[in-house]
Amino acid sequence: MIWSLFKIILFVAAIAGAVLGAGLITETSGGVRIAVGTIEFNLGPLQSVLALIVFVLAVWLLLKLVNLLVAVVRFLNGDETAIGRYFDRNRERKGYAALAEGMMALASGEERVAMAKANKAEKYLKKPELTNLITAQAAEMSGDRKQAEAVYKRLLADERTRFVGIRGIMKQKLEAGDTDTALKLAEKAFALKPRHVETGDILLALQATQNDWTGARKTLGTKVKTGALPKDVGRRRDGVLALQEAKEVFAEGNSIRAREAAIEANKLSPDLIPAAVLAAQSYADQENKHYAARLLAKAWAVKPHPDLAAAFARLEPDETPEQRLKRFRTLTKHQPDHPETRMLLAELHIAAEDFDAARKALGDLSETDPTQRSLTLMAAIDRGQGADDDAVRGWLTKAVTASRGEQWVCDKCNHVHGDWRPVCAECGAFDTLSWTVPSEGEVKMHGGAEMLPLLVGKPQMPGEVVEPVAPAAAADPEVDAEPADPPHVDFADAPVESASEYAPEAKPNPKK
């Protein structure tokens, strides 16, 4: 707004100055006399100024005409002149216009238009490094992979476009399932541009898929060194790779080297649960159970997980339930309100047949965070306290439609895995598994799921008093009635994923 106002004021001032100057010239006496032979011209002041302007323009036009004549003569002799540059600029203008239209058509999904515009741009520009890329992408979009690969191969001849060509062929090989060729191409592309994030990630995932952990760690080190990956992320992923190396060494039977690799993996990434489990196993093999317990407790304080509890239980496999409950205080004192800690305590108390303590440890978890595991634990507690079959089956029925709880879920594609792995089995992404509740884990049975508790019985809620089950009456009143056997519920088919390794099954007879 201010700039526009300034330009208007400047324009008015220039007009006013010109008018004032013209007025001063017209009021000036005298003039200019030009005599050529017998011809004489007398010009006034204003006429003299106008004549001077016309003379300057005439001289400028004359010089331009002379330059044009010289350029024509040189052009006829085959020299590169202004005329050639003029036509080149015209071709470039048309070529870049066609290139822009081809890019717009490619973005709009019009692959045939994009290929036609790319050919037109190549005709005018003669720059295949620009037009071939549009042609290749349009060919891929139209499903013509053969032509796309041929175009990418043409890009390999130019150093400026070699990376683009290798990357394009690499992606085609990946889509075709030729991972061996894709791995070699990824190595070449990464060597050309080690800072390229996508290529580095693809190479890392392919090396992990091929179990080339040494090569993967080298690639990871290059990414961190070149700044393509933050140091903390690189250290975490290096721990993942070291963990896989340790697992392979364990499988080979090299116990000494395996222990060193497992401990190194845990040091590189202390929050990596599988690394902590493997490192604890290596310390236990060295008869250093105290340090193994400390390591697992430290990992539990960061992220409680059933695998940590199972590894902690394996340190003393022959202990009694009471001894195990006492030893597990090393874990349960950390994050006591975490659902995993509460379910762990409940399972330990169930193993010790202290069902009141198990119910107290579980608390209201079956209401605030109902999962298959917590609901099945409630069924076990009710069973241990002598509840009838209907109440127990009621809990198991609720568990059928409940969430499975936290699982190993890929952050990239949300695929759920039964066990942790370095590479997602669905999308092939590296180090993307997190222990969390999957979005699809909240399963709901439609069409009458609410009726199931009414059909099989109502579960006993926490805090309710359990009435003892009366013994069945004898058919003959003269015969003494024998107490009926407590109802048996088979928990083998219960939909629960619990750490059964550290909590033995509850005994069928309730504690009196």
Image (cartoon, rainbow, N blue to C red):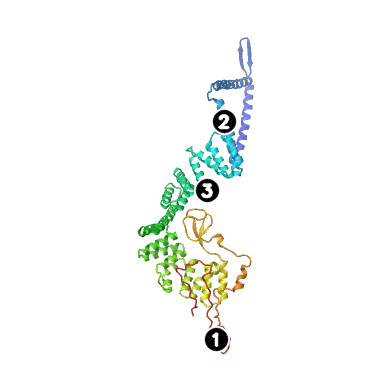
Q: What residue do we see at 48% from left, 60% from top?
A: 419
How packed mark 1 is, by other alpha carbons closer than 10 Å (few <14, some 14-19, many 20 or more), is few
User: Circle 1 — which element?
Assistant: loop
> Which residue appears farthest toward the top when viewing the image?
38
Q: Name the residue type under label 3.
A: Ala
Q: Which mark is residue 89?
A: 2
Does residue 284 appear anywhere in the picture? yes
Find the distance from the CA under tag 3 to the CA under tag 1: 75 Å
Find the distance from the CA under tag 2 to the CA under tag 1: 111 Å
Quick check: 259 left or right of 209? Answer: left
Q: Is tag 2's residue or tag 1's residue first in the polypeptide sequence?
A: 2
Q: Name the residue type under label 1.
A: Ala
The percent coordinates of residue 15 (x first, y second) are 63, 29
Q: Is 386 placed above or below 421 here?
A: below
Instruction: Name the residue beneath numbered marker 1.
Output: 481
Instruction: Name the residue beneath numbered marker 3.
Output: 176
The quarter of the rendered structure image containing the N terminus is top right
Quick check: 20 left or right of 300? Answer: right
How packed mark 2 is, by other alpha carbons closer than 10 Å (few <14, some 14-19, many 20 or more), is few
